[in-house]
Image (cartoon, coloured by chain):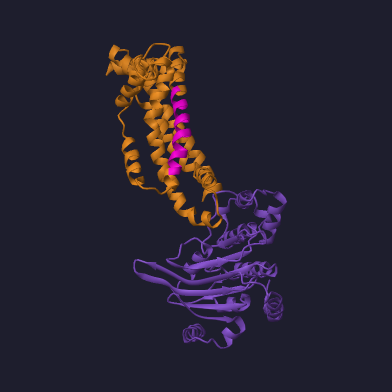
Chain colours: A purple, B orange
Amino acid sequence: MPDSAGSSQLPARVAAQSKDRSREPPALCASGLVVEVEGQRLLDRVDLTLRSGATTIIMGPNGAGKSLLLRVLHGLIQPTAGTVHWRTAGDGRPQRQAMVFQKPVLLRRSVAANIDFVLGLHGNRNRARRQVLLQTVGLADRAQQPARLLSGGEQQRLALARALAMEPSVLFLDEPTASLDPASVLWIEDIVRSTRGRGTTMLFVTHDVGQARRLGDEVVFLHRGQVCEQTPSADFFAAPTSSEARRFLAGLIVL
Amino acid sequence: MHDLDAALGLALTLVVTADADLLEIVGLSMTVSMTALALSCAIAMPFGALLGTCRFPGRGAVVVALNAMMGLPPVVVGLLVYLLLSNAGPLGFLHLLYTPGAMIIAQTVLITPIVAALTRQAIEDLHTEYAEQFRSLAVPGHVAIAALLWDGRWSLLTVALAGFGRAISEVGAVIIVGGNINHLTRVMTTAIALETSKGDLAMALALGLVLMTLALVVNALVFAVRHQTERHAHA
């Protein structure tokens, strides 16, 4: 189980990582992103550059456009204006992406078949690989159970295993631990942390300040569809530069 | 009333003693309707799934037309298939009129819109739930449709049952293209119609009993399978 002793070592590791990767081209350059629906601006001129291998936390009040930004960056929603440019893989093809949704959508099949479906998409249906993935999320002994009968936390872990089966270079997580019990949250944070250790670029939407502190390299704060600030994690929680983020954090602490 | 009692007694005797004529008629009914069901499922389920997942101009009109065709009157279908298969018709060279083959074609035409329309509804509901996840996983179209059909298999079982119920119980289409020829194209519904008009109520009643029992058994089977799997896999 991850604990505070583990997280206290994080900044050193992050610093070492950022030094290694500082010369690499950014994983993502998005500029001037606008999404308008029926005259309402849901995303307003968002510019975003993400470092390869970093975990970026996206925070902001409800309706700020966090999930929408994730979907636009993932390519699920076409922006009204602006460009999203992801770094290509070594062979010039787009890097693989995967997304874990707030509410997992599992196939009406067994736990194993849910993983096999994704592995099959890439033509490497492989029992051993499936077992490794299920072990990673602690579901190896549930392989033959119907996925839809798992508990909420187990379903989300399976959704995470399925995303990892894609072997993504970029992983989107849209409030994956909202409404989960603390044990499930820690499970998922553990997996996310080891995924970051493998150099996967991650975008993580969360409302949980503690979680953001534990997992994030940097924080992007959204308010009314605009990026108020993009700050390294340590600085953000010590002294956010935007007044919106200051009010947001103060509000949460009062709560 | 006495007539009815006697007929009912005779009918039960026919069923219990497994009367050869009765068995032949029931067997042909089942063969024709099951074949028609298999054919229409093979055509209508992929088509329904495609219609349930694709967006194109004029889709609404296709859906409305398909739903309207669920109510096709069997006699009209019989007449159209008769015109197609008659010696002067475009498919006359097949010499299928007044054979079980013609009856299979007629019933297939009759129930394909039903199976397609109900499949469209079932798959569209499932697609709404899966669409974003599938797009995120970059699932190719044909894989997505196969996955939706497989994951919707228990709903589709009910859809197939609706098609089978329509096929096995209709009389208008098979009597026109089959002709109710003894030992060749006589099925339960056409036999009931004939025997009733001849006054042989026992045979008609016996066939009616078998038809209703069959409907009951098939429904019970599907219910049991669904119940079992819902507990274990569907949730």
Q: What residue is drawn where x is 62% and y is 53%?
A: A115
B42 part of magenta stretch = yes
B207 shown above or below A14? above
Quadrant assignment, res A238: bottom right
Magenta stretch prevailing secondary structure: helix
Quadrant assignment, res A37: bottom left
In the image, residue B59 lies at what x, y percent?
A: 36, 45
Q: Is residue B171 visible?
A: no
In the image, residue B33 lies at what x, y percent?
A: 43, 25
- Labels in figure, total: 0
Q: What residue is drawn where x is 35% and y is 39%?
A: B66
Q: Is residue B39 visible?
A: yes
In the image, residue B201 lies at what x, y percent?
A: 32, 15
Which residue occupies the foreground of this view, A187 or A83?
A: A83
The N terminus of chain B appears in which quarter of the rendering?
A: top left
Q: Residue furthest front?
A: A92
In the image, residue B109 lies at what x, y percent?
A: 38, 29
Q: What residue is drawn where x is 42% and y is 66%?
A: A80
Q: What residue is drawn where x is 59% and y is 78%?
A: A218
A36 shown above or below B162? below
Residue A11 located left or right of residue B62:
right
Range of the magenta residues? B32-50
Which residue occupies the foreground of this view, B177 or A137?
A: B177
B216 part of magenta stretch = no
